[in-house]
């Protein structure tokens, strides 16, 4: 609200203020409308959620510019400070206190004033990454009374023997590349701004050495996941440079994930990525050697190879989100009453799942039998009737055909409370891989792609277990350098890390 006392008496100046305020109001109205459209408007199901985050950031920045203009206009100063969300500053952050004293603490009567209270405010301060040099001195001692020899402490083991980086430096390079999506050449550019000139190939050699040492931890992670009786699996493209042709070829990152938290399972969440040069089902079969149980996947036909195992030890639970996407694409392209009805029925299934999330597997199964099974019985009849009404080759017919083809796997979640309704948990773990792929464009070599998969596995598993990735990488590299026993390798897994 404008304070009338602050308004000028000059008519021309007053008109200018009103016009300026109208312009600001119009800009704000447009920005708010754009924000609502980005937040609530229709979104392509294939779009990267990060794209919407970028839209929100830019719109919110533009809104704040208008607010800043108003705050800077003396005649339009609000009578009360504008409230904003300043966030919460964690207690573990170090505090640097500054005390602002009055220029003169002497009272008008001549006496010295004393403190009766104080106002305290906190602001977040960021210091850009600082480099420092660790100087290690090892004094040599000799006896002046005899010639018994010289005594000197042994040098500490290092990840890069004879090299300049500490384990923390190598961890920083790894986390920046595989968690923050900064390619090595960009990191080298950042370092050079502080006068530290490091060639990209030098950073690459550090990462390679660390990858070699961390491989046993990754192997242990993958082995631990395959001991579970229920996992998720998905795959995403991984462009890899083909040096002989000067082009890229398409490989794949296969993600194997565990997340038992929705049904209160005790096994810690984790994900392991594996690079393979193709998408054939034999790669999934190879990765899953040693696994038996329920595998939650999308509708990719390559997974059917797992059903041909002589041991018949794998069940495939299919993804309702993928089935829904088939109907969504039809409904979005044209008026399709059948697709719309299918979406409505699937939405009812998801509402039940939202209600039972976080309950035990037994409680979830009981709720599904009572509430979900009747709806799926209705859906199955509707599916058969709807397929009879449309051409099998029409978009609607193709979508319904897909659901019918995978029906047994889609309704498998009615038999086990541990099974999720969709494959979304593993798809969420793949998103950082996709973002890194956009920034790096491609992997430079198949071996580099596997290192990428391995290091990303450890970092993403850290995130799933609320472990800070940099502290984790530093901790396990230090342990390995100091001779951690291979027999105790499980203690180095992210969920066992004690920072």
Image (spheres, grey):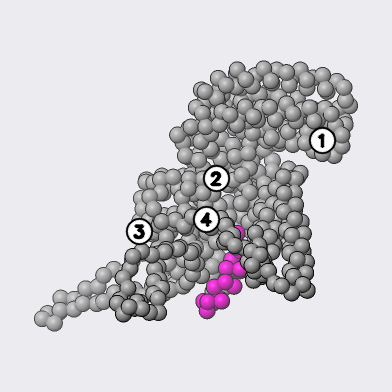
| Residue position marked by numbered label 3 in the rendering | 482
Give the mark toward the camera: 2 or 4. 4
The residue at the point 31 percent across, 70 percent down is: 114
Q: Report the mark closest to the observer, 4 or 3.
A: 4
The disc, 3 or 1, on the residue closer to the chain's N-terminal end is: 1
Question: Badge 3 local density, few (<14 within 10 Å), some, or many (20+)?
Answer: few
Q: Residues within 10 Å of mark 4 (few under 14, many from 20)?
A: few
**The quarter of the displayed image where residue 426 is located:** top right
Q: Check whether the beta carbons of the residues at disc 3 and disc 2 lie within 8 A of each other.
A: no
Would residue 37 appear left or right of 105 to someone viewing this image?
right
Counting residues from the start of the chain, the first of labels 4 and 1 encountered is: 4
Secondary structure at badge 1 equals: helix
Residue at 82%, 39% in the rendered image: 332
Mark 1 — residue?
Answer: 331
- Marks 4,3: beta carbons within 8 A: no
Q: Secondary structure at mark 2?
A: strand
Q: Position of residue 359 (x, y in %)?
A: 51, 28
Q: Earlier in the sequence, mark 4 or mark 3?
A: 4
Q: Is residue 182 magenta?
A: yes
Tag 4 secondary structure: loop
Give the farthest residue toward the bottom. Answer: 144
Which of the labelled discs sits on residue 87, or is there none?
A: 4
Mark 1 and mark 4 in contact (Cβ < 8 Å)? Answer: no
What whole-number distance in Å separates the C-alpha atoms at marks 4 and 1? 41 Å
**Residue 15 x, y percent position in the rendering:** 78, 69
Q: CA distance from mark 2 to mark 4?
A: 34 Å
Segment tinted magenta in the rendering: 181-197
The residue wearing badge 2 is 272
Q: Indicate the position of residue 374 as horizontal and vertical percent values.
A: 67, 17
Q: Are marks 1 and 2 in contact (CB under 8 Å)?
A: no
Between circles 3 and 2, the one closer to the viewer is 2
| Nearer to me, 490 or 262 | 262
């Amino acid at each position: 609200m404008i304070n009338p006392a602050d308004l000028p008496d000059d008519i021309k100046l007053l008109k200018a203020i009103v016009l300026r305020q109208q312009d600001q109001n119009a800009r704000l109205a447009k920005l708010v409308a754009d924000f609502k459209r980005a937040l609530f408007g229709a979104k392509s199901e294939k779009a990267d959620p990060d794209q919407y985050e970028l839209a929100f950031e830019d719109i919110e920045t533009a809104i704040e510019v208008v607010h800043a203009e108003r705050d800077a206009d003396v005649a339009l100063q609000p009578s009360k400070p504008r409230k904003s969300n300043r966030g919460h500053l964690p207690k573990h952050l170090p505090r640097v206190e500054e005390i602002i004293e009055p220029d003169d603490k002497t009272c008008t009567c001549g006496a010295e004033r004393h403190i009766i209270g104080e106002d305290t405010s906190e602001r977040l301060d960021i210091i850009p990454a600082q480099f420092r040099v660790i100087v290690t001195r090892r004094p040599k001692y000799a006896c002046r009374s005899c010639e018994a020899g010289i005594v000197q402490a042994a040098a500490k083991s290092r990840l890069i023997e004879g090299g300049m980086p500490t384990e923390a430096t190598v961890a920083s390079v790894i986390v920046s590349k595989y968690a923050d999506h900064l390619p090595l050449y960009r990191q080298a550019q950042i370092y050079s701004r502080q006068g530290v000139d490091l060639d990209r190939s030098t950073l690459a050699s550090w990462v390679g050495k660390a990858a070699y040492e961390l491989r046993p931890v990754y192997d242990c992670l993958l082995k631990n996941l395959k001991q579970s009786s229920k996992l998720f699996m998905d795959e995403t493209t991984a462009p890899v440079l083909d040096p002989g042709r000067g082009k890229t070829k398409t490989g794949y990152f296969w993600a194997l994930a565990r997340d038992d938290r929705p049904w209160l399972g005790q096994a810690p969440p984790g994900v392991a990525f594996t690079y393979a040069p193709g998408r054939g089902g034999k790669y999934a079969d190879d990765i899953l050697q040693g696994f038996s149980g329920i595998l939650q996947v999308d509708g990719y036909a390559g997974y059917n190879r797992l059903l041909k195992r002589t041991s018949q030890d794998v069940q495939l639970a299919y993804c309702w989100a993928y089935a829904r996407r088939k109907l969504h694409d039809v409904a979005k392209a044209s008026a399709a009453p059948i697709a719309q009805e299918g979406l409505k029925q699937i939405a009812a299934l998801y509402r039940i799942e939202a209600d039972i999330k976080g309950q035990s597997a037994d409680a979830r199964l009981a709720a599904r039998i009572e509430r979900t099974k009747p709806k799926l019985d209705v859906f199955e009849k509707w599916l058969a009737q709807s397929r009879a009404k449309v051409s099998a080759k029409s978009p609607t017919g193709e979508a319904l055909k897909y659901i019918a083809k995978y029906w047994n796997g889609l309704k498998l979640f009615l038999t086990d409370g541990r099974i999720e309704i969709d494959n979304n948990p593993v798809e969420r773990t793949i998103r950082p891989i996709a973002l890194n792929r956009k920034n790096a464009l491609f992997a430079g070599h198949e071996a580099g792609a596997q290192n990428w998969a391995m290091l990303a596995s450890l970092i993403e598993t850290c995130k799933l277990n609320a472990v800070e990735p940099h502290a984790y990488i530093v901790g396990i590299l230090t342990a390995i350098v100091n001779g951690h026993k291979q027999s105790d390798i499980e203690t180095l897994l992210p969920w066992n890390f004690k920072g």
